[in-house]
Amino acid sequence: MGVLENIEPGELYDANYDPDLLRVRKETKIKLHEYNNTSPAEEDKRNQIIKELLGSCTDNFIIEPPFYCDYGSNIHIGENFYANHNLIILDGAKVHIGDNVFLAPNVGIYTAGHPIDVERRLQGLEYAMPVTIGDNVWIGGGVTVIPGVTIGKNTVIAAGSVVIRDIPEGVVAAGNPCKVIRKVTEKDSLTKNYKK
């Protein structure tokens, strides 16, 4: 989808009235409508739709419907990806998600933002900044990730957090705005009530 190559990270572009962007978003919505209305028995069909929609993915992923995105082609997911219901990715810029990433329900990953001043906002202008999520990240339910954020590998983002700045690797982070609470330690592997 060459039309997205014209979007420079952090630069304003016409998101509401550009006919090429509108066309691509409509094509994406048609594919997502088909995906979100498949039977649970149609797993192969679902997987094929996602492979056609996303910029890249492996064979080992699960995205529970409903799933929504703007373009799809800017989304790149790694091995062993799981997203629970109601994932929303606004992918005006690239979204890179590493291996073994798990997303709880109602996660929003937004690369798109709008000008603060009314005049430019009413012109339909927006900007987009890439989002990167490292390997082995767990993101809890209802988390919002805003444009330009990087979440480091082996990190946990607690439910309900709003991630407005980069989060380092190997930590537990929570809150609005999301802040590091502590490092992930060996003690965390001693989960109660787990039986082999």
Image (cartoon, grey):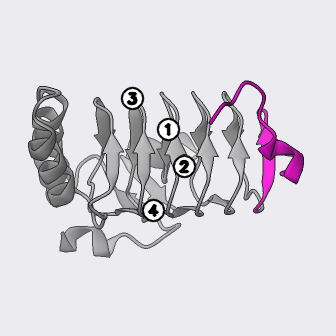
**Image-quadrant location for residue 168:** bottom right
Q: Residue furthest front?
A: 196
> Residue 187 colored magenta?
yes
Q: What residue type is labelled 3?
A: Asn
> Mark 4 or mark 3, which is nearer the start of the sequence?
4
Q: Which residue is drawn at 52% across and 33% down?
A: 104
Q: Circle 3 is placed at which residue position?
A: 86
Q: Circle 2 is placed at which residue position?
A: 115
Q: How many angstroms separate mark 2 from mark 4 (CA)? A: 8 Å
Classed neighbour count for the residue bearing mark 3: other residues with Cα under 10 Å, few (<14), some (14–19), many (≥20): some
Q: How many angstroms separate mark 2 from mark 3 (CA)? A: 26 Å
Q: Which residue is drawn at 18% across and 69% down?
A: 1
The percent position of residue 114, horizontal first and vertical second, equals 50, 47
- Kindly tell me whether residue 187 is visible in this rendering: yes
* Front in this rendered view, residue 43 or 63: 43
- Kindly tell me whether residue 181 is visible in this rendering: no
Q: What residue type is labelled 4?
A: Leu
Q: Mark 1, mark 3: which one is toward the viewer?
A: 3
Q: Circle 1 is placed at which residue position?
A: 108
What secondary structure is marked by label 1? strand
Q: Which amino acid does label 2 sit on?
A: Pro
